[in-house]
Image (cartoon, grey):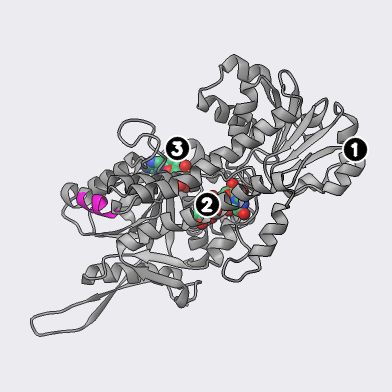
């Protein structure tokens, strides 16, 4: 077990001295206390108790939540995360808003700020907005008085490292910055196990220089505290940056591919889960990421593919761009199709009909709602004047309203009138005409479905956008059950 992080400096004098000077890196700063920075630093702190880690953020409220004495109030819901935070917080894991101090004292700085899709100007709706990254770079350059290793954790367009280096080298205090790319592959809802037992850790760096090589080694040594060496992959910077976009594009492509088949299954009478099982047993295809759904959401898939499309277009690679854009178009179609099917089935009108939403998060076991398909299905139905009542076990009421209001397509008054967040699933479903399942929370199968049925308008419809409910049981009770990828209601 390594005690702390050691960087090996090779001293090569005129006499050819090859003495190794070891510098122990003791402090890490992570800028950004979000879904990536928080869990990642918590695990590094747990696995490397000798390293002091300070996670900083501009958002005082978020930092206060991370510091809440009741550890169940940390701002991110992830199974197992609060235990890890409870173990390390106050020992070698700290959350703070004093960004300058944390930068100044650290040897290694992770940048884990958000890189949303641009909402203005050139590349609007496609390119990644790098303003938060640039602000970080300028702050690091201004504050740093000693050499730093700067690690890109956020997903970034290819060659962002070069832009970072330019800013750091031209505005800094004449100290040396080594830039590494270390993309995060954790999936929300399984962050703790993904970080504890990753398929691989990817580290990109400029290994052609001695300092670059040392920086890569330094980061390798941190992960080597718990990740087997053969799973720690080192590449050049650009391969690492592009690999992250590629991984997300391939994963999203599988979901869009099976979702495309779900529509065909519904018309032909095939069953998409059976098709997925049959193809997934082919070892060349494999069984994962073949669950047909109402569409993929989350902060990464759409953003990263749009980014990839934008990059391809900017190099004039129009066929490459069109190919990947189709993954997004298919996903948009799947969400709309689900909403339209509800309208069509409810006799072509949902005006003033109550529709219960089970689930609002973009997947189970997270409170994150970014790009959740629920938001877009709700938008379509609200535009058809439906009333929507939402129940999600982890999403806060205010988040639901923010998600819809941010779209800007529905008047605020109309949102207040038509959208309600229920205090439990029974309240959400009471007096509804239909139930739509938007997230695959496991607790949905434990509900008293007879009670739900008794309190609904008849016929009582269920539209299972995740294919998770017990179809036979629901049909026996009397529900009219529709499942994505299965023929006819
Ligand atoms: C993803 C990548 O998996 C992760 O490696 C990367 O670091 C960030 O982006 P995440 O968005 O957290 O992670 O969740 P993921 O499990 O990939 O699911 C993304 C979306 O696809 C969810 O909405 C999920 O419900 C949907 N999905 C996933 C399906 O609809 N079907 C599937 O078979 C798998
Ligand atoms: P991710 O899923 O990539 O972690 P989040 O939005 O959950 O994204 O977290 C990013 C965090 O980065 C936010 O809490 C935001 O306040 C923080 N942040 C953005 N820019 C800066 C900055 N310049 N300095 C410090 N924190 C920042």
* Magenta region, main secondary structure: helix
- Please say whether residue 41 is one of the residues in the magenta stretch: no
Give the magenta part as a residue range: 161-166
Vertical placement of residue 120 versus 181, above or below: above
Residue 98: x percent and y percent?
38, 43
Above or below — where is 286 with respect to 470? below
Q: Which residue is the site of mark 1?
A: 478
In the image, residue 339 sits, relative to residue 256, either above or below, namely: above
The numbered mark at residue 163 is none
What residue would you read off at disc 3?
59
Q: In which quadrant is the C terminus drawn?
A: top right
Whichever of labels 2 and 3 marks the residue nearer the N terminus, that label is: 3
Q: Between 138 and 47, which is closer to the camera in this rendering?
A: 138
Residue at the spot 91% in from the left edge and 43% down from the top edge? 476
Q: x, y (%) of residue 182?
A: 39, 60
Residue 15 point in image, percent of width and height: 9, 85
Q: Residue at x 25, y 47 (%)?
A: 143
Query: Assess mark 2: CB under 8 A from ligand 1?
Result: yes
Secondary structure beneath label 3: loop
The answer to whether residue 156 shows anywhere in this view is no
């Amino acid at each position: 077990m390594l005690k702390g992080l050691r960087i090996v400096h090779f001293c090569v004098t005129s006499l050819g001295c090859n003495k190794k000077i070891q510098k122990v890196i003791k402090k890490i700063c992570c800028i950004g206390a979000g879904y990536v920075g928080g869990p990642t630093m918590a695990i590094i702190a747990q696995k490397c108790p000798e390293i002091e880690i300070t996670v900083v953020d501009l958002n005082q409220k978020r930092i206060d939540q991370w510091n809440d004495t009741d550890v169940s109030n940390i701002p991110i819901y992830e199974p197992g995360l609060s235990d890890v935070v409870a173990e390390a917080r106050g020992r070698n894991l700290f959350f703070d808003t004093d960004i300058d101090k944390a930068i100044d004292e650290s040897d290694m700085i992770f940048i884990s700020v958000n890189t949303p899709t641009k909402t203005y100007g050139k590349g609007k709706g496609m390119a990644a907005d790098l303003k938060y990254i640039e602000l970080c770079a300028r702050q690091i350059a201004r504050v740093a008085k000693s050499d730093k290793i700067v690690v890109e954790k956020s997903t970034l367009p290819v060659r962002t490292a070069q832009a970072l280096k330019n800013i750091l080298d031209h505005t800094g205090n004449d100290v040396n910055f080594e830039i590494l790319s270390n993309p995060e592959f954790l999936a929300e809802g399984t962050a703790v196990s993904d970080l504890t037992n990753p398929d691989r850790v990817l580290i990109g760096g400029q290994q052609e220089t001695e300092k670059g090589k040392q920086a890569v080694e330094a980061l390798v040594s941190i992960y080597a505290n718990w990740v087997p060496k053969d799973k720690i992959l080192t590449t050049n910077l650009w391969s690492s940056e592009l690999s992250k976009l590629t991984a997300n594009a391939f994963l999203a492509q599988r979901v869009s591919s099976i979702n495309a088949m779900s529509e065909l299954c519904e018309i032909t009478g095939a069953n998409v889960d059976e098709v997925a099982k049959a193809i997934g047993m082919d070892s060349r295809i494999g069984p994962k990421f073949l669950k047909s759904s109402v569409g993929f959401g989350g902060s990464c898939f759409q953003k990263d593919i749009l980014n990839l499309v934008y990059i391809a277009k900017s190099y004039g690679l129009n066929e490459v761009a069109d190919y990947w854009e189709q993954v997004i178009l298919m996903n948009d179609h799947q969400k709309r199709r689900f909403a339209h099917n509800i309208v069509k089935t409810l006799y072509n009108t949902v005006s003033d009909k109550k529709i219960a939403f089970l689930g609002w998060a973009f997947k189970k076991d997270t409170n994150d709602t970014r790009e959740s398909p629920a938001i877009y299905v709700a938008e379509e139905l609200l535009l058809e004047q439906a009333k929507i009542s939402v129940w999600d076990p982890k999403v806060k009421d205010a988040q639901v309203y923010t998600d819809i209001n941010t779209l800007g397509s529905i008047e605020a008054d109309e949102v207040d009138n038509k959208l309600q967040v229920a205090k439990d699933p029974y309240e959400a479903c009471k007096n509804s005409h239909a139930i739509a399942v938007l997230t695959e929370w496991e607790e949905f199968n434990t509900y008293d479905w007879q009670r739900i049925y008794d309190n609904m308008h008849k016929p009582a419809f269920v539209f299972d956008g995740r294919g998770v409910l017990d179809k036979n049981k629901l049909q026996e009770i009397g529900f009219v059950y529709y499942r994505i990828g299965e023929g006819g209601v």
